[in-house]
Amino acid sequence: MQSHSIQDRSVSVSVSGAGGSGAVTAGLILLKSMANAGYYGYMTRFSGPQIRGGESAVVLNFSDSPVERSARSSDIHFALDWHGFERFSDEIPLNSQSCVIFDNSHDALPDSVASTGAKIIEVNLKDQADQLKGSRPNAFAVGIVASQLGLPLNAVLEALEQILEKKGEEIFRAASEAVRTGYGLLEKKAAPLEQWKPVSHTRWNISGNEACALGALRASVKFAAAYPITPASDIVEYLAPRLEKYGGNVMIAEDELAAINMAIGGSFGGKPSMTATSGPGFSLMIEAMGLAIASEVPVLVINVMRGGPSTGLPTKSEQTDLNQALFGMHGEAPHVVVAPLDIADCVVTTQWAAGLAEHLQTLVVLLSDQRLGQSRAIIDAVPSQTFDLKRKILPVQDGKGSYLRYAVSPDSISPMAIPGNAAGRYTADGLEHTVSGKPSSMASDHLQQLKKREAKVTQFDYGRMWAEASFQQESTEIVVLTWGSVYHNAKAAVSELYHEGSPIALLGLRLLMPLQTEAIQALCKGKKVIVVEQSYSGQLYHYLKGQGAIDASALTLAKPGPLVLGSDEIKAFIKEAAND
Amino acid sequence: MQSHSIQDRSVSVSVSGAGGSGAVTAGLILLKSMANAGYYGYMTRFSGPQIRGGESAVVLNFSDSPVERSARSSDIHFALDWHGFERFSDEIPLNSQSCVIFDNSHDALPDSVASTGAKIIEVNLKDQADQLKGSRPNAFAVGIVASQLGLPLNAVLEALEQILEKKGEEIFRAASEAVRTGYGLLEKKAAPLEQWKPVSHTRWNISGNEACALGALRASVKFAAAYPITPASDIVEYLAPRLEKYGGNVMIAEDELAAINMAIGGSFGGKPSMTATSGPGFSLMIEAMGLAIASEVPVLVINVMRGGPSTGLPTKSEQTDLNQALFGMHGEAPHVVVAPLDIADCVVTTQWAAGLAEHLQTLVVLLSDQRLGQSRAIIDAVPSQTFDLKRKILPVQDGKGSYLRYAVSPDSISPMAIPGNAAGRYTADGLEHTVSGKPSSMASDHLQQLKKREAKVTQFDYGRMWAEASFQQESTEIVVLTWGSVYHNAKAAVSELYHEGSPIALLGLRLLMPLQTEAIQALCKGKKVIVVEQSYSGQLYHYLKGQGAIDASALTLAKPGPLVLGSDEIKAFIKEAAND
Amino acid sequence: MIDIAGEKLSPEDYLSDVRPVWCPGCGHYFVLRALTQALAWLRIPNEQIGLVTGIGCSSRISAYVDAYGFHGVHGRALALGAGLKAVRPDMDVIVAGGDGDGYSIGGNHFLHACRRNMDLTYIVMDNEVYGMTKGQPSPTTEPDWQSKLAPEGTGIRRFNPLGIALASGASFIARGSAGDQKGLSRLIVEAIEHKGFSLVEIKTPCVTFRPEEKAWYKRMRKITIEPTDDMILAAQRIHGSDGFDTGIFYQADLPVFQPHFTEEKSIEDFEKEFEV
Amino acid sequence: MIDIAGEKLSPEDYLSDVRPVWCPGCGHYFVLRALTQALAWLRIPNEQIGLVTGIGCSSRISAYVDAYGFHGVHGRALALGAGLKAVRPDMDVIVAGGDGDGYSIGGNHFLHACRRNMDLTYIVMDNEVYGMTKGQPSPTTEPDWQSKLAPEGTGIRRFNPLGIALASGASFIARGSAGDQKGLSRLIVEAIEHKGFSLVEIKTPCVTFRPEEKAWYKRMRKITIEPTDDMILAAQRIHGSDGFDTGIFYQADLPVFQPHFTEEKSIEDFEKEFEV
Ligand SMILES: Cc1ncc(C[n+]2csc(CCOP(=O)(O)OP(=O)(O)O)c2C)c(N)n1
Ligand SMILES: Cc1ncc(C[n+]2csc(CCOP(=O)(O)OP(=O)(O)O)c2C)c(N)n1
Ligand code: SF4
Ligand code: SF4
Ligand SMILES: [Mg+2]
Ligand SMILES: [Mg+2]
């Protein structure tokens, strides 16, 4: 097993197996066990093309400080069997530092694994399971891995209880016996957890999609309408049972065209509203997103990106809907596009995004991606915070007033009337209109309203939320610019280089539109700029150039999905670029 | 009346009136009359917000050489009445050089017109019409205008016959009497046509939308599916009765989602296929446009742009769907975007576009706009031409072969099998796939197919069609870059400056994606570059910058619709920019 | 319905100050009149009315009524209206539009709105043509009507709105005529008062692109059909009608969909679920 | 249908070499078997078959049949298939998909495909759930089925595919069961041979997200319904059925839409129209 320096106190584990072998459950138990023991962890899951019954795998990374990326390679890989393992060769890198434990009651060790030089340990879990009524091999595997990590048995049993709670006493008893047995099966190792410092404060076990949903709840979103799609469905599935106990509700739409229009209707009715989808559904929402912009109705649209184009790679991650989120609508359609940088940030950024929609009375698109959304991590509880972002509402009055829904004001935001207010009767319109909302095709009205809609989003002060800058110094010479789920690996690369003495800084953009061009220029001017993103064409890079935020001399490391853009790869690219 | 220099032998006429007054018919007759007399002309029409029964106006510009833009002001304006005339103040500029003739049997002369200092002539057409059974005021107006222009009476009567052909002998007789009477009513003027040289070769009376449709027919498009929308409906309405006599057909879809999918189905079946729409419909086609790209099925989508966002200004022109046409689809979705520069070019560019779709087996978007599409002009017949752009087809063979639909080839184009060919059975897929079309989410397949789809469009040699460059010289210092319906006014401005001695050149882009970055750089490097476009945010400008085609120092004159970006305005902007 | 005391209300009390852009003689004027008359009879406070429309000549009606209006995008009015009603059950949500908006591009939402049976009133101003885009055949156009887009007619049978509404689960299905002001107003009143999804399909001539439809004013029969809640009987009447009958073809007491919510949880409750 | 002489064909002759990714035991396997059996009986040359699908577990079927297939986007298969049939009347175009694909997002195309009555065969693999996206309620799901998205059920009545097809103008309407291989194959044969739009609605269990549906294999009755061309009778049967009957509920000889074309004009003819 690899030795770990103080700076990198982490250990990585992966588990794989055929469908039904319980690899994912094993991962969930290990993640929870680590949390119980006072540590942090991060888990991603992968599956083959089969819908069910196909092979699946989990990749976990643990540490005693927050961790939100996978390791370079697996320290321990547990193969419940070798079914379809070759599909995971990219996701589960093994090397001579790895320790591979496998259940030899199925296929023999594949040559490809043997040739990695990893240390190999064979166990026969079929025999074990046969001896212990009601037990399953994955529970033994959990015990074995826990013992090899030096994870306290108690922490594992506690996790087991939490996870199997609903399955009944019987099942829990058998599983805990299996874990115990597994724990004693191989010689127990104390390393690497020996040097780790457990924490005792509250942490959360949360996925990125759940985090987005929580952010929406914090922002008082009260209505969501959606049509299922991978990998976004979890968001609304999380909300469905909760929102209806929290003064709101979720509506299942017949398609995405309906979903976004329902959300616009709900928002027009006075409730902060949202929808969540992925690429194909987002494409279907394009027309109505333009309507929200033109009629100035607040709405939050979350796009959990997957690989494209078209149906593409529905279960894999990519950052390639950026262009569409920025420029997908017809006509001049200024709006807001934001993206969280990690799982905790999903909570904060979603709350912010929903607030921005309300405050600016427009469309806000939040771009998450499959990796962010479907990964699960143990993170510090995200402290609650308040953004002073509320819908400006026309005071309720009796009798019809002379309300001008689209009046031009200093901040270009006009108070919105909520139905029921006698003074505020008006008709929201996607046709170009006058200040009162009356349809107009006069050049002067068009120009006035175009300006209004643009000014309210561009002139707003987004404060410090627009980006996360780190390692900035007087002497900074290189700036790495990135966004979304690539952030953590980019940060790891930059951090290493910085600590190795490079004059390097990192900028993780949270606000993509309106682009904070001057602020970016201020940080990047005269520096070597490297844009890192998970796309084929370099969408962010070209966008930043087009807006004049970065110079023609900037470089880009753009790589399409579905493989993760690793920190080593990023580091190597930066090093080479720095030497040019 | 304004005196005309040899360089600018043109005369402009406008006609306005309440709904039913026949202003548009008067315009059509005058346009045809000019054509019959051997001249050229250009006509745009405007109407108030009423659906029918509201005021409408036509603005015409005539010359003895091809003309495809409106004049700075009206030389003659004929008001059949003053109903809603104030709405046309922008479109019908009058000044002291103008001559205004009006029927005084309705409202009195508006102050706003009197104050222009135009020469005013009153006629009473009600009296005239009362005397001549079955006659209508607009026919007298045609006669009057013709006499003032010095347009031969014969040419007018001939046009009248052609246009009223289907209405019966009676109506034609009354109308021609009225024209004759009108012709004699005021003192006849020979100027300005006196100095003009009539041509005798074949010319066409055609609108931009008709020209697009003809281009599609020339390219052997055999199937169109569409859902009506202003201002694109004319295209498919033109095709409907013709295509079914030309080996093809038009299908009326239930919505745009169906329209584009039908077109993809038709193309998959082996027939060059297309659809036509405008902004809102284009937005609904986004998802399936991605499918055409991913599954490599040729399809042509014409977007006749109108003012946006959302429903926007449905009957007005703007160039603001550029961003969407380029970047509207989710995922990495390389495709082709082209735009015609004038009405004749609608024929050529549409033919080219349909050919490119077939040859490159992908989505081609053609961006026209309301101004181009719904204007009508007398132009020289567009000579037929051939592009060597055909679909590469798998030869028909018996028995199943080992066909690889998405095989990687040197030009990245793989022969397409047409259903019925036993050797070519395959399943087209919008999921990422292997060379055989089998769904795959492997990183290597994704990268391979992404590259293939991009390479086939970027590596193709588009030849000289990519742009029209004019006034280029060794000494060129300023390059004006533009596209679409703005081209003719930009050309007028550049031409004047060039002839005034400015070292200026013009570049009208026909191919917008893939951008011919190096070719643009070659023409623009080191020059002062000015991008002229009808948008609010400068969509073309930012795009060119983002792709590195132009430098950060480039300037932009971007103005939203619906008003035309006039040549004076463009000229003034360039002049000021040149002096900076 | 909220009844407010005071003087008698008139249709004018429900007219906004935006002047209709419809062609002189368009049937839609009569629908506007009948709708505002119905609202006056019902005395619904203007601000409690949500009037949601799509795009089309007919859909312009939301600007002409003094209420909370939404002139959305083509074909999606029912979805937008459903969202509004979901969060604002206190409001009377009326959705309106044309045959193109509702039965062509909007067909899917029509199906699912019927099925969902929310308490919405859906007014379709059916002129058997796309008026706004200048005279193309719509789903309700006769198969042999000749137009630019279909020079020899579409050759496709007409969409049967009442039959489809019935099969999809609408609980109130009526046909009215723009020519019968009083009858139409009464149908609209019944539709608004009905609990559940109500379809009021109105024959309203497009005088510009289908001048022959002016004959409808005479040809449509005044309220000939009385309500039934027997689906098979309703089906017989609908499929047996020549299209010129008016009245309520079907009215039944079916479960109404209305999302409910409580306030029993706090954000802390949700956060606790994540704690380890 | 083109009959080719020669040896007897088997379902395998219509299977591609792509292995299904369906869960073990999924009802869709039986549909694949029944479809390929029907094609074998009909002896349609593989290359004359167009099999168009949308997205969903069921829609994956286009990759498993050895024919010209199109795996398009979610909900649009009927439109794509209509385009294919419009230009290729010589082909047998079969459109297939799930209840989500066809009745939820694809509802509008379903309506208009029935109405248009082109000579297409539409196979819906109805498992009353969105299988592919892991178990959300579809339009055909019972109102009280509990799922993550609708913890207490949707409370919305089920979509009635047969009734809606009938009201919208489909000329062949059948229900089959994945459990009755032979009966199902025969229904598919009849549907393909029928001239006009044929709906074959198939009950096929999703064993993963709705394991209780395995009971269908026993519960569905083998071909109990005989065809009628009487609409009202068909409506009675459809609305009277408990959902477990199979057979052809309606079959009628209605005008089939198929765009026709001639080659009587040349490009020069069109250009001449513009000449002045
Ligand atoms: C997505 C989209 N497609 C097409 C249009 C063009 N369009 C506007 S109104 C209309 C049809 C109107 O017909 P109908 O709903 O019957 O209303 P009517 O004008 O006849 O009252 C169409 C096709 C549009 N605005 N948006
Ligand atoms: C536009 C769009 N929206 C949503 C999805 C996600 N999605 C894929 S399949 C599916 C539903 C599948 O259900 P069904 O058609 O019944 O097929 P089944 O899997 O049950 O066989 C959904 C919602 C998508 N691919 N595209
Ligand atoms: S076009 Fe027809 S529907 Fe539209 S306003 Fe005129 S008459 Fe009415
Ligand atoms: S999820 Fe359901 S429908 Fe999909 S393959 Fe599995 S059993 Fe079949
Ligand atoms: Mg209509
Ligand atoms: Mg299903």
Image (spheres, coloured by chain):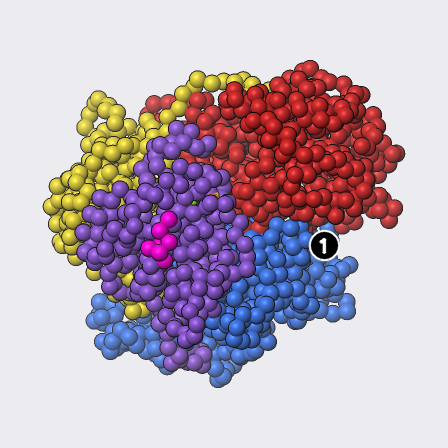
Chain colours: A blue, B red, C purple, D yellow
Q: Quadrant of the N terminus of chain B?
A: top right
Specify start and end residues of the magenta stretch as a single range.
C179-185
Q: Position of residue C7 (x, y in %)?
A: 43, 72
- The one nearer the camera, B313 or B18, is B18
B369 w.r.t. A446: above or below: above
Say what secondary structure mark 1 lies in: loop
Q: Residue at x 55, y 46 (%)?
A: B50
B529 w.r.t. A360: above or below: above
Q: Position of residue B578 (x, y in %)?
A: 85, 44
- The one nearer the camera, B287 or B335, is B287
Q: Position of residue D221 (x, y in %)?
A: 12, 50
- Amino acid, disc 1: Gly
Residue A547 seen in the current view: yes
Image mark 1: chain? A
Asked where in the image residue A122 lies, by quadrant, the reply is bottom left
D79 w.r.t. A456: above or below: above
Q: Residue furthest bottom?
A: A200
Q: Is residue B12 left or right of residue C132?
A: right
Local crowd size for mark 1, using a 10 Å CA cut-off: few (<14), some (14–19), many (≥20): many
Q: Classify mark 1 as within 8 Å of ligand 1 or not, answering yes or no.
A: no
Asked where in the image residue A474 lies, by quadrant, the reply is bottom right
Residue A309 seen in the current view: no
Q: Residue at x 82, y 29 (%)?
A: B4
Residue beneath label 1, please? A548
- The one nearer the camera, C89 or A86, is C89
Q: Residue at x 38, y 61 (%)?
A: C38
Q: Residue at x 49, y 41 (%)?
A: C133
Q: Main secondary structure of the magenta part?
A: helix
